[in-house]
Image: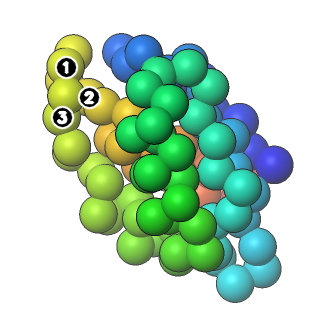
Amino acid sequence: MFTYSTNGTCSRQIIFDVDNNNKIHNLKFIGGCNGNLQGVARLCEGKDIDEVEALLKGVICRNGTSCPDQLSKAIAQYKKSLKN
């Protein structure tokens, strides 16, 4: 399980798992717009993390970011943590 603390959004944290095939699972947003973020989580379930990151990067809501954009940043941070 990977946990990412968001910046500039109503959601406070993003939590997810990644399997051995680079697929995202069990995505949860803590805080934020519950219905919309459940939808984002369901749409991302089982998708390749590189695909999700590229698709959601740069989606802007307010403060120069959004919950989907923060998910792309969370995935980038997850990938960076694998290299350390």
Residue 65 locus on image (x, y percent): 26, 28
Q: The residue under label 3 is which amino acid type?
A: Ile
Task: Name the one closer to the observer, 79 or 19.
Answer: 19
- Secondary structure beneath dot 2 equals loop
Q: Give me the residue at 21% from left, 15% from top.
A: 63
Q: Earlier in the sequence, mark 2 or mark 3?
A: 3
Residue 4 locus on image (x, y percent): 62, 33
Is residue 2 left or right of 46 when viewed as pictured?
right
Pointers 2 and 1 in contact (C-beta within 8 Å): yes
Q: The residue under label 1 is which amino acid type?
A: Arg
Residue 20 locus on image (x, y percent): 78, 80
Pointers 2 and 3 in contact (C-beta within 8 Å): yes
- Label for residue 35? none
Quadrant assignment, res 64: top left
Q: The residue under label 2 is which amino acid type?
A: Thr
Can the viewer see residue 82 in this picture?
yes
The CA distance from mark 2 to mark 1 is: 6 Å
Residue receiving disc 1: 62
Look at the picture and state if 54 lies above or below 11: below
Residue 16 locus on image (x, y percent): 69, 50
